[in-house]
Image (tube, rainbow, N blue to C red):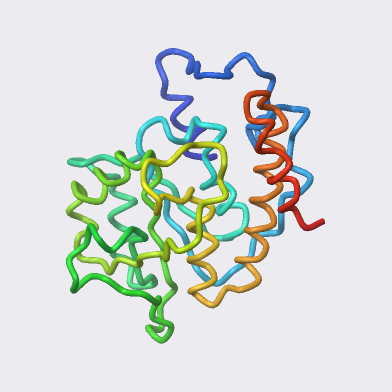
Amino acid sequence: MSLRQEELRKAERPFYARGSKVKRCDTCLLPSAQCICGYKPSPATDVAVLFLMYKGEYYKPTNTGRLIADVVKENHAFLWDRTAPSAKLIALLHDETYYPIVVFPHEYATQDRCIDQPPMNTGKKLLFIFLDGTWREAKKMFVKSPYLHGFPVLGVSATAASDYLLRESSHAFQHCTAEVGISVLDLAGEKEGARTLAHYFSIFRREYLKGKPHLQHKLAFAAAQVKE
């Protein structure tokens, strides 16, 4: 959200997207009638997350990366740039405090980079890097970011079908950012954080669908997933 505000301040003209006429909460970006700020959890966990965001992704109310940021206390977000990445981003990636791990499907990484489990005994804080954008944008960021090429790649299992319901994926393994975050936290031993994010995500999904007349056929399933 801080990155979003920063980009809005720099914008030379107002940003208008589909649904821009809807009165929204300035914090959660959902329609005011479906605001989920009252459900926002207390951030915790002993890991850190970094969102490398494709231009425009931070404007979308459907973006679920911010749900992870509400659960993981230490979170960072940067606008992706192929040739001129932020100096703060590069400094963070090379900070000896952290152990950076790129979260992405293994089929796009060389075998020597692929890991199925985050290392738990490095003496450093795990820093999970999420490439946040559409599938095509995320793949572009993965391929065209040489400053990420030296880091291990954690592939999240795609055995379970996505419950996102808000966007249609062209590939079976494409889960939304929050769903991937749930799996990553679980793999990192952050069981409570994973449960908290799963519950928070289920509330977000239910409330978002309430404001979408063309998606009402999906609302009953979404509402049933919320464990009050």
Is 115 in front, or is 81?
Answer: 115
Q: How many marks?
A: 0
Dividing the picture into quadrants, the one containing residue 23 is top right
Q: Can you say whether 137 is above or below 196 in the image? A: above
Q: Position of residue 91 (x, y in %)?
A: 30, 58
Q: Is residue 50 left or right of residue 199?
A: left
Q: Position of residue 1 (x, y in %)?
A: 54, 39
Q: Can you say whether 62 is above or below 142 in the image? A: above
Q: Residue at x 49, y 74 (%)?
A: 188
Q: Is residue 143 left or right of residue 165?
A: left
Q: Position of residue 120 (x, y in %)?
A: 43, 83
Q: Residue at x 56, y 37 (%)?
A: 166
Is 187 in front, or is 159?
Answer: 159
Is 182 in front, or is 158?
Answer: 158
**Residue sitting farthest toward the right:** 228
**Residue sitting farthest toward the bottom:** 121
Dividing the picture into quadrants, the one containing residue 28 is top right
Q: Quadrant of the C terminus?
A: bottom right
Q: Is residue 102 left or right of residue 33?
A: left
**Residue sitting farthest toward the front:** 217
Q: Can you say whether 212 is above or below 45 in the image? A: above
Q: Residue at x 30, y 39 (%)?
A: 136
Q: Position of residue 59 (x, y in %)?
A: 49, 30
Q: Is residue 15 left or right of residue 54?
A: right
Dividing the picture into quadrants, the one containing residue 115 is bottom left
Q: Can you say whether 70 is above or below 1 in the image? A: below
